[in-house]
Image: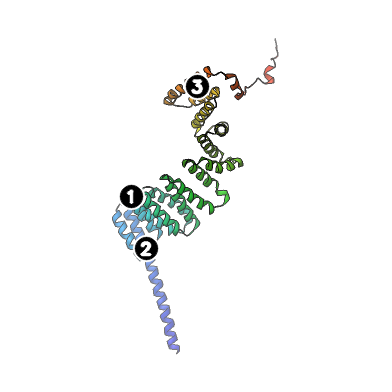
Amino acid sequence: MRTIILVIIVTILYINLFAQNEETSNINDVKYNIKLIKFYIEKNEYDNALEYIDKTLEETIGNDSLYFFKGFIYKEYEDWQQASESFVQAILHTSEEQIIDERLAIFEDAIIHVSPLTAFDIVSSAVSEAQNAQKHIGFLNILARLYENNQLYGEANDVYRTILSETEETESWNLKIKIATNKIFQKEYEEALNILEPLIAIDDSLYNERLLFLDYIANLSLEHYEDAKISLLRLYLDFPQNPNRKDILSGLADVYEQQEQFIMSWYMLHELYKISDEVQKYMLTKDIDRIKQKICESKTIEDQFQYFKPVLETEEQYIQPENND
């Protein structure tokens, strides 16, 4: 009996040892193949690299590096669909958080070249397969941007609301701004304002610049000129380096003209003229001349001076210097 038990134990140990040796051998084979694949890629011998990638994938459970190499090669071939599908697998199979965002960006660069319907399917499947929040939200953001690229703003907002429900409140501002922006593209201006106004009221300096510009566009589109002017004036006074400075000045000129405040309209056009190129200056000259004509014809020009705040001399400027002669 003891002999039988001993034989069984020895047999089990032998099987385990054989399995470990085989596993070690497989690992070594994969490492060798990866080195060989890298060599072929460096030599631009992509067909040979693909052959070894497919062979190695058949012999091992999904290796994220192999999928990434495959995606890289198909990207070089401009086979965007296969590149995208390979990058998805490279993302899904990796457990290294620090490279997930980098691979998501590479994947997005490829998927934008795929036909829209196919791209939607690829990313939607990736969303379903993603097993952690970083990958899941990363794929959702890409899906939303694909919808926006194809002017499917309602679908994009549905995705952003899904992300919004899965993120912390501190991370929700950008998502709400994106939703409001898409509402403007959909010409749903009142709904956009319903999102923007509570955010503007919080007066967060990190977001005010973007919020006020969107608020101006929505109000101007609704012909709410006074509300549009309020947002534009805040942008004009508080954010002189705003990249939309020309649009802000042009918007103020238009709003003041609509309100028949022609002097202020002329002033804003003159400010815009200072920062415009030669072609823009030529076009602005016509607008300035037109506003000047309206000023000359206006019968209520004195009422417009309420919009100016003259800078008076300070008390010190009235003090005469002493005469030392």
Q: Position of residue 195 (x, y in %)?
A: 55, 44
How crowded pointer 3 is (Cα within 10 Å; few <14, some 14-19, many 20+) is rated as many
Q: Secondary structure at mark 2?
A: helix
Residue kind at label 2, given as amino acid type: Val
Q: Position of residue 198 (x, y in %)?
A: 59, 43
How crowded pointer 1 is (Cα within 10 Å; few <14, some 14-19, many 20+) is rated as few
Image quarter of the N terminus: bottom left
Q: Position of residue 287 (x, y in %)?
A: 47, 23
At x 44% / y 86%, what residue is drawn? 5
Query: Tag 3 or tag 2, which sits nearer the N-term?
Result: 2
Compare residues 230 and 296 and report the one nearer the observer: 296
How crowded pointer 2 is (Cα within 10 Å; few <14, some 14-19, many 20+) is rated as many
In the image, residue 213 above or below residue 157? above
Residue kind at label 1, given as amino acid type: Glu
At x 39% / y 74%, what residue is drawn? 18
Which label was assigned to residue 30? 2
Q: Is residue 147 left or right of residue 43?
A: right
At x 47% / y 20%, what residue is drawn? 289
Q: Position of residue 248 (x, y in %)?
A: 51, 31
Q: Nearer the viewer, mark 1 or mark 2?
A: 1
Q: Which residue is mark 1?
A: 76
Q: Secondary structure at mark 1?
A: helix
Q: Gap between marks 2 and 3, in whole Å?
A: 76 Å
Compare residues 178 and 54 and report the one nearer the observer: 178
Which label was assigned to residue 291? 3
Q: Nearer the viewer, mark 2 or mark 3?
A: 3
Q: Are marks 3 and 1 in contact (CB under 8 Å)?
A: no
Q: Are marks 2 and 3 in contact (CB under 8 Å)?
A: no
Q: Gap between marks 3 and 1, in whole Å?
A: 57 Å
Residue kind at label 3, given as amino acid type: Ile
Q: Gap between marks 1 and 2, in whole Å?
A: 24 Å
